[in-house]
Image (cartoon, rainbow, N blue to C red):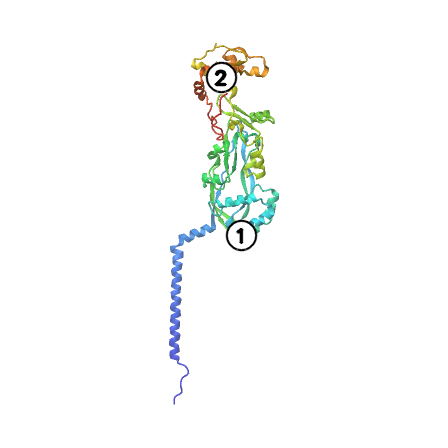
Amino acid sequence: MEPLALKDHDKENRVFLARVLLAFSVAVFLLILLVVRLFYLQIIQHEVFSTLSDQNRIQVQPLPPMRGLIYDRHGELIADNSPSFHLAITPEAVVDLEELILKLNKMLNLSDREIERFRKQLARRNRAFESVPLRYKLSQKEIAKISVDLSSMPGVRVEARLVRNYPKGELMVHAIGSVRRINEKDAKSIDPIAYLGTDHVGKIGVEKYYEKDLLGEVGYQRVEIDARGRVMKILDYSLPLPGSNLHLHLDSGLQQVAFDALGNNRGAVVAIEPKTGGILAVVSKPGYDPNLFVTGIDHFTYSKLRDSESTPLFNRAIQGQYEPGSTIKPMLGLSALSAGVIDETYLVEDPGWYQLPGDERLYRDWNWKVTGEGGHGKVTLDKAIYRSCNVFFYDVSVKLGIDSISRDLSLFGFGENTILDLPEAKKRITSFP
C-alpha cells in the first residue's frame, strides 16, 4: 500500500499563483487610478489649483491714498494729515478671535465701544485678509506692551496710518467742516472699492462737498505671505494717487480776528470779498475741536457737546434763520429807484415813527428807541442809507408793494442759499423785517 502525501504542492502552487495575479491586478488597477487622478489634478485642473495655491500664498493689499490738504488764501495749512499708530487684526491669521480679543482687552483695557466698532467693521469687510482696526491712536506705552507679545499673537500688528488733523481746531471747524469715521449709513452709499483701506469720509462742510477731489485713488500691492499671514515679499505694486489740494478764499488771520472779537459771546461773523464774492471768514461761536471726531469720539464727550445749552455743534453762520435787518435797505432803495417810485431828491420827514394809513400803531425808528429824542428829520435816500433810517424805508416799502419787493430782492439772492460749498447751509430765511 502506497503512503498518502501530506501536501498537494501542485494545488498550492496554483492557489498561490492565482492570489499573486489577483494582488498584482489590484495593484496595477490602483496604480492606474492614481496616475489618472494625478493627471487630472496636475494637468487638467492645473490652473484651478494653481490659483487656489496662489490665493493662500499671495495676498492683494490696498494702499490707501493720502487725503488732499486744505490751505487758506495765503497758503497757510488748515487741514493736513498726521501719522497715527493703530492696532489692527487680520482675522484669517487668528486661531481663536474671541480669545485674542480677551487677551488684548487685559493688555489695553479696551472699551465696549471699541470692541463693538471692531465687530461692525469686521462684518462690513469686502475682502479676505483685510486688517480691521481695533484701537486707534496707540500711545508709546501701549505699543511697547503689544510689541513684547507680538510674536505670540499671529494676525495682530501695529499699523502706521495717516489721519486727518486740524491744526486750527475750533477756529476753523465751522468754516471747513471735518472728516469722520465711516459708519453703517455711509457704507451703503459710498463706493467700497474707492474706500479700500480708508476709514474716514468727509462728513460736513468743505470736507464733504469736495470729497471726490480730496479722496484720491487707492493703490494695491501683491505680497507673498507665510502661514501666519506675515508679509515675506512684495511681488508688485501700484502706488495710490493722492487727493487734490484745495486753496480757499478763507483768510486765517481775519478768521482769528473775528473769532477773538466775539469773545465769550454766542454769535456768528461772515466776511465776504465784494469784488469776487469769495468768503474771507466764517465764524460761529462757540465751536468745538474737530479732531475729536476724526478717530471716533467717546459717548460722554459727544453727549456733552450735543446737550450743551450753547449748542457748539450748530453753525450759526449758515444754519441760523436770522432776519436780514438793515442790510436790506440799500436793495430797497435801488428797487424803488428802478421802479420809478422815488428819485434821488425824494424827501421823507422822519419824526421818529411811521404810521400806516388807517392804522393807529406807530412803527418806531431806531433813533427814537435808543435815544428817545425823535427821528432824523428830513431824509433823502443817501442820508437814509448812511443813517440807516427806518422811517424812510418804511415809506418806500409801502409805495413799492410786497410783490415788487419780493421780486427785486430775489435778484440779490435773498431767500436763497448762495453758499456753494457748505452743504449744511439753510436755503431760505424765515421772513423779512
- Label 1 neighbour load within 10 Å: few <14, some 14-19, many 20+: few
Looking at the image, can residue 168 be seen?
no
Front residue of 186/213: it is 186
Gap between marks 2 and 1, in whole Å?
Answer: 73 Å
Q: How many marks?
A: 2
The tag on residue 195 is none
Which quarter of the picture shows residue 164?
Answer: top right
Location of residue 347 in the rendering, given as x and y in whole percent from the top left corner: 49, 10
User: Residue at 52% of width from left, 20% of height from top?
Assistant: 325
Question: Disc 1 marks which residue?
Answer: 96
Of 121 and 233, the residue lying toward us: 121
Task: Give residue 1's position: percent from left, percent from top.
Answer: 38, 90
Residue 28 placement, left or right of 344: left
* Mark 1: amino acid: Asp
Residue 320 percent coordinates (x, y): 52, 27
The answer to whether 315 is drawn above or below residue 400 in the figure is below
Q: Which of marks 2 and 1 is nearer the N terminus?
A: 1
Vertical relation: 422 (above or below) 433? below
Query: Mark 2, residues whose alpha carbon is within 10 Å: few (<14), some, or many (≥20)?
Result: some
Q: Between 72 and 339, which is closer to the camera in this rendering? A: 339
At mark 2, the secondary structure is helix
Query: Label 2: which residue?
Result: 330
Label 2 amino acid? Pro
Image position, residue 430 (x, y; %)? 49, 25
Whether residue 53 can be seen here: yes
Label 1 SS: loop
Front of the two marks 2 and 1: 2
